[in-house]
Image: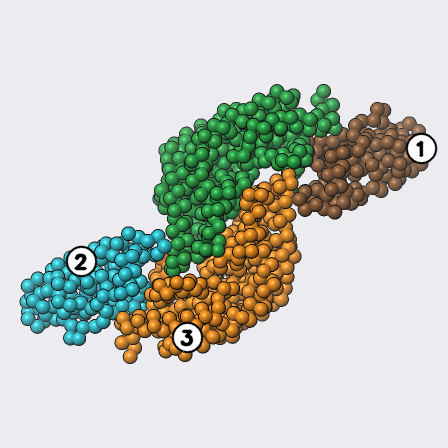
Chain colours: A green, B orange, C brown, D cyan
Amino acid sequence: MKRIYLDYAATTPTHPEVVKAMLPYFTGSFGNPSSLYSCGQEAKGAIQEVRVRVAELIGARDEEIVFTSGGTEADNFALKGVAYANEKKGDHIITSSIEHHAVIETCKFLERRRFSVTYLPVDEYGLVDPDDVRRAITNKTILISVMHANNEMGTIEPIAEIGRIAKGAGIYFHTDAVQTAGHIPVDVNELEVDLLSISAHKLYGPKGVGALYIRKGTKLIPFMHGGEQERRRRASTENVPGIVGFGRAVELAQQEMSEEAERLTYLRDQLIKGLLERIDHIRLNGHPQKRLPNNVNVSVDYVEGESMVLNLDLEGICASTGSACSSSSLEASHVLLAIGLSHEQAHGSLRFTLGKWTSEEDIGRVLEVLPQIVAKLRAMSPLLKSHR
Amino acid sequence: MKRIYLDYAATTPTHPEVVKAMLPYFTGSFGNPSSLYSCGQEAKGAIQEVRVRVAELIGARDEEIVFTSGGTEADNFALKGVAYANEKKGDHIITSSIEHHAVIETCKFLERRRFSVTYLPVDEYGLVDPDDVRRAITNKTILISVMHANNEMGTIEPIAEIGRIAKGAGIYFHTDAVQTAGHIPVDVNELEVDLLSISAHKLYGPKGVGALYIRKGTKLIPFMHGGEQERRRRASTENVPGIVGFGRAVELAQQEMSEEAERLTYLRDQLIKGLLERIDHIRLNGHPQKRLPNNVNVSVDYVEGESMVLNLDLEGICASTGSACSSSSLEASHVLLAIGLSHEQAHGSLRFTLGKWTSEEDIGRVLEVLPQIVAKLRAMSPLLKSHR
Amino acid sequence: MRNVWSLYSDKVMEHFKNPRNVGEIENPDGVGHVGNPVCGDIMELYIKVNNGTIADAKFKTFGCGAAIATSSMVTEMVKGKSIGEALEISNRAVAEALDGLPSIKMHCSVLAEEALKSAIDDYLTKNRRGKNNVSL
Amino acid sequence: MRNVWSLYSDKVMEHFKNPRNVGEIENPDGVGHVGNPVCGDIMELYIKVNNGTIADAKFKTFGCGAAIATSSMVTEMVKGKSIGEALEISNRAVAEALDGLPSIKMHCSVLAEEALKSAIDDYLTKNRRGKNNVSL
Ligand SMILES: Cc1ncc(COP(=O)(O)O)c(C=O)c1O
Ligand SMILES: Cc1ncc(COP(=O)(O)O)c(C=O)c1O
């Protein structure tokens, strides 16, 4: 059975070109970039080239890019780094209620360390209202963090507008661009952000690599303490092959982004339309237009998400759900609850995220298979009866 | 010109077998281990196998192993994690003055966050005196961190003895085993440690992967906040290929360790003997016996380290130095100063660290080349004259 | 045997794919409703009792793979058992019959046990009311 | 041109490999001693002056690649210059003559400038004492 991978937002396969680019740095140019001799300097040069490339992708300068072990570290670094460095100025942070756990859990940690955090609500589509941001600002506010696009339902936030507000108020602004960098245009100056998180494995690069953009002049302290790597901003021996792979992935993304976004938007809309037509009692989560080109998120009434995902897996289709059952906590996705879904609806969510190897036939196959799965599960659902 | 790599303590080439083991996890089994469907679970299974293997290497249980992005993260996690989780019990930490920067800088950070740190001195060989540890303990002490072996001069510390003291006093004990794991026997129960750091790229695994051993029952909070990976102890999408490579490297290390340690000890002693014979005004740094099998560290009077490293590089030999000039600070190695070297001697240090691909001819070549380099540099040294 | 490539054992997957005893029993002798939408698992378990023996059992479940499989398994296990025997079926017994559950899914087996107990309770209550006495 | 695979430019490496004017001058007209062991760079610069022109310059240096290359370069640059011209040689000029230095190594060029100034200073002091006057 052919596998149909539709969970590109969870992780992407590493592009074969990326793997090829990485290989020489494992056994050949394997040196430590901090070393003085040539094979170390060679690795250092390779990293520098990637830095320039990543900077280019987001309209930044190379010295504003710090490599990390992924999106989570970039988010931790940005939030803790700014909070600790600016605590004399204030102790208040503003974020949204639909951030990735890497931001939410970091905020909760900071709350336990005497910072106070405002979690802004979102509307039914998952949009943050810039006016809410403006109203939440106090003279103690040192940082605003709102994600560029939401990983579960794909809603794209009004970052540039929030950026203008933050800038006007002289408050640092961070955005988690893990789901957007390499997929839709991201420009740190247009968005007016001071800090921006990226993760390589979401754009066909390797897992375990990411970057934090830090606008020149931003006051923050390191998150990883130790050696003098990354101009003393991030310690630890650089993951040279990983960073080189990240660079190649960024290069490919730059070449293919606009065409690919168009192709995926078409497939996405086909899938949405097909699902709404073929399954009753189903709703689209997230904004219909202000949405990532590759994201489809629906709630299917009366059935639970994990049981749909497992049934899809039996048919060779990889998808995900915001249901509690997919995690060790029993709570359904905080994102879906934040847009006002009931617990049943949140538990009945299903996310398909499309990517480079998604074809029209794949979409067709989902549209063929899912209605049967839903019918089978609804037949055993105690909820259907009570809603009849 | 054949390259002679003698900086295995800085980083090792990734073993070709390790690269081979990693490859399927980039493009084939690339799933996110948190995913429910089979290709995610497959990745999760692969990680679990490595966890068992790493646990075996150090005599631990698999659930006591948490994967990290390297040695630095493991050190940061251990120190900050224990400090924050136990601050109600006390605010005092004991460490040594020859720790890696990943420990020292983390301690300095904690000092700025209202913890107090005692940096124990070492003797002329770099040994911490367990009695000093005992004397430094107060009723506020919550953590002791002393490295297993020093990365610069290879001295192996009396960890088991310190472990017994820590255990007797009911204080958590961390050791940075980045230079020992996979090279000499490491057993968390024999050493009586509660936390232990490992880095894959020091044992022929990939860069950007490591592990922290956390003894069951140890109270610590996460360092990377976010998702529920690693049983909620370390967020971020797991670096699956990296972890798999780490596992293969550990497997190879287990097979080859004792034989390889013996071979390297022989080569090491040959190199030490040869250098002391052929170059006058030279001294061995670190303990002559209680020393890593692969470490040679000497101070060559009247010449500076970087200029020796660069000249060696011109001859195809990769080595390192504790000289200031190798870093952006101008201070010579804190480790060499701690054993009582003068600044000149510390700046005149040279480290050769041997490894899997080091041969007897390589040692011969160093012994042939280095005396000439030293003679050339001494001819331009203003220090030689003043010492005459 | 736990398959490394799956969250669940083969046995769980088998019951998930082909759940036994799905549905409702008309005029059941006992019904158990357990779980709640917040946690994402809701089970309904129906039993038919003949002479103190559970002659039939059916279920309806909204929930994850483990919830469906434990529902299926518990209805299988209970059929033909006396009320007394049925009350002795523990959540562990259900999980073991499925060749184990991942630890984060053990709550589903608890739910299955509770659904069964609740159905029996319902039967006993009705019966006590009706006949005043029941031999366990 | 900066070689990506090296910390230093080809020019720095060339001077590092074949440093010019290594040594001491017997009976020098001026000597400069700068640097200190804590920072790991010590330079000695010797000059011979003929009719207000620097006829010869030599150095001895304990230090990194950049320290040796800047010493070599500054002695090359200064030869044949008048004292006035020599005093105008800045650390930047030395660094530029070497096709640049990594930013963490710029302090070596500062040291080279200081060594030269200090040698000239020594010459001027001795001379003033001797002849009471010197034409710059
Ligand atoms: C929006 C967002 N932020 C952060 C992360 C964390 O990235 P990583 O897994 O690289 O740590 C993810 C993905 O997991 C994400 O989707
Ligand atoms: C003793 C010691 N601890 C920690 C580290 C840091 O490890 P990593 O580079 O994997 O972060 C190193 C090596 O750099 C080391 O030698």
Residue at image position (30%, 77%) is B387
Q: Circle 2 marks a residue in which chain?
A: D
Query: Could you tell whether D131 is left or right of C80 in the image?
Result: left
The 10 Å Cα crowd at callout 3, few under 14, some 14 to 19, many 20 or more, is many
In this view, D117 is above or below A98: below
Q: Nearer the viewer, mark 1 or mark 3?
A: 3
- Which kind of residue does numbered mark 1 sit on? Asn
Q: Quadrant of the C terminus of chain C?
A: top right
- Which of pointers 3 and 2 indicates the residue nearer the eye? 3
User: Which chain's residue wears label 3?
Assistant: B
Mark 1 falls within which chain?
A: C
Which residue is tagged 2? D89
* Marks 3 and 2, how far apart at CA: 42 Å
Q: Residue at x 15, y 60 (%)?
A: D87
Res. A328 mark: none
Which is nearer the eye, B248 or A195?
A: B248
Q: Position of residue A233 (x, y in %)?
A: 41, 50
